[in-house]
Amino acid sequence: MTTFSSSSGGGGAITQFYNCVVLKDHQLVDDYVYVQDGKIIDPAKMFFDERRAPDVRIDCGGGIVAPGYIDVQINGAFGYDFSNDTDIIDEAVDNVSKGLLMQGCTAYCPTTVSSRPEVYKQVLDHLGPRAGSVERGAEVLGAHVEGPFISPQKKGAHELATLRTAQGGLEAFDECYGLDRLRRNVAYVTMAPEVAGVLETIPQLIEATGIRIAAGHSNATTAEATQALAGGASMITHLFNAMHPFHQRDPGVIGLLGASGTKRPFYGIICDGVHVHPHSVMIAYRAHPDGACLVTDAMAAQSLPNGLYKLGEMDVDVHDGNVYIQGTNTIAGAVVTLAECVRNFARFTGASKVEALESATLHPAQMLGITDRKGVLTYGADADIIVLDHELNVQRIFVAGQEATRENVVYKNKL
């Protein structure tokens, strides 16, 4: 008779998630998930080589087991702003990372709005990649630098005085950010293809730094946007917002969703019901479902009461889920959570649970090129896991294989 031990074999304790359906291979399947030392593992070695039983078993109550959510555009939350809180940037990252983790977001790209070069010198070294844990919160995947090489006509809530052109080519980006700083700390940069010097420099910038490029805050024609895509751009920042409106003869950046004969880009989309009408979300989903990356574009007021807050150097007014530059009707970021975006996306589009979940897990990981470890539950991937009910409400959260609870993840709001 074969006997199994719960403590033999190498490595740390093994955890089994059971009584669940698992998001894998674009399906929800009845299965188990096994975790050891912060990674998803193949149980075959445990069963057949080590003759070992799981040390911990987690009953998921018939729910859904999915990878943790990934937000690739978030300006701040819990009172903190990554562009404005330059003197307390480490405090900002610590508290936002922990707060996001407790919402089911296990990895993210802290986002800066268009700023002066001295701001990038102050903050980017503090926004680079760092591992997630219950002690440190959600993993930081590197910064998303939004601007300042963007269109003055489509600046949105970005300060006009900070905007720049790239007429100096690669040197202009070095002068603004520091190429070495980009290389070490940045996941991707949003820029407008039509800004002088940008189109010519995109391939050089990718080669010099390894970062990814997104088109956004742009008045580009479809021809210019297509050139950017051919040059290496792979993402559209907050689709429909701050860009050339759709026109039948020149749909602008939005037209890339209908491109043929080339790889279509991923696109961020804010599903708060404010930034993008549900019908527009449906159009994007129908045009290119595999490109959807749900983002919050959240700012400091996320999870806080109505009032006046900062977005970079701009004063913004938050009330009833709406965020505007103070004294104007210009939208300035959001206060939605990524978990809410997932549920809204399913409701707005009729997308399946699989499609809604993958738009906040697999797709952003694909956009960043990190599906070897994020956005999936394949063997060897990081054990960043959420357990949801079938209405897509997050019930339990795990980062690097450890459960995050109100008792072991402590953070504060900056009020």
Image (spheres, rainbow, N blue to C red):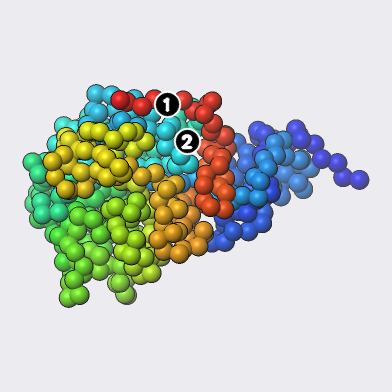
Secondary structure beneath disc 2? loop
Which quadrant: the C terminus?
Answer: top left
Image coordinates for residue 146, horizontal then vertical, percent:
23, 46
At 56% from the left and 42% from the top, the residue drawn is 395
Q: Indicate the amino acid at tag 2.
A: Met
Q: Are marks 1 and 2 in contact (CB under 8 Å)?
A: yes
Instruction: State whether residue 148 is above or below residue 345.
Output: above
Disc 1: CA contacts within 10 A as few (<14), some (14-19) or many (>=20): some
Numbered tag placed on residue 102 in the rendering: 2
Q: Which of the 4 image quarters holds residue 214?
A: bottom left
Residue depicted at 57% across the width and 34% down the height? 402
Disc 1 to disc 2, C-alpha distance = 10 Å
Please name whichever residue, 210 or 249, is drawn nearer the observer in this view of the structure. Answer: 249
For this rendering, which residue is in front, 308 or 11? 308
Q: Circle 1 sits in a helix, a strand or a loop, which is it?
A: loop
Residue beneath the point at 17% across and 42% down = 325
- 87 vs 380, left or right, is left
The answer to whether residue 306 is seen in the rendering is yes
The numbered dot on residue 411 is 1
Q: Is residue 372 among what the camera can see? A: no
Q: Residue 41: image x %, image y %? A: 63, 46
Q: Residue at x 38, y 55 (%)?
A: 293
Which of pointers 1 and 2 lies earlier in the amino acid sequence? 2
Q: Amino acid at mark 1?
A: Tyr
> Would you place residue 129 above or below residue 390 in this image?
above
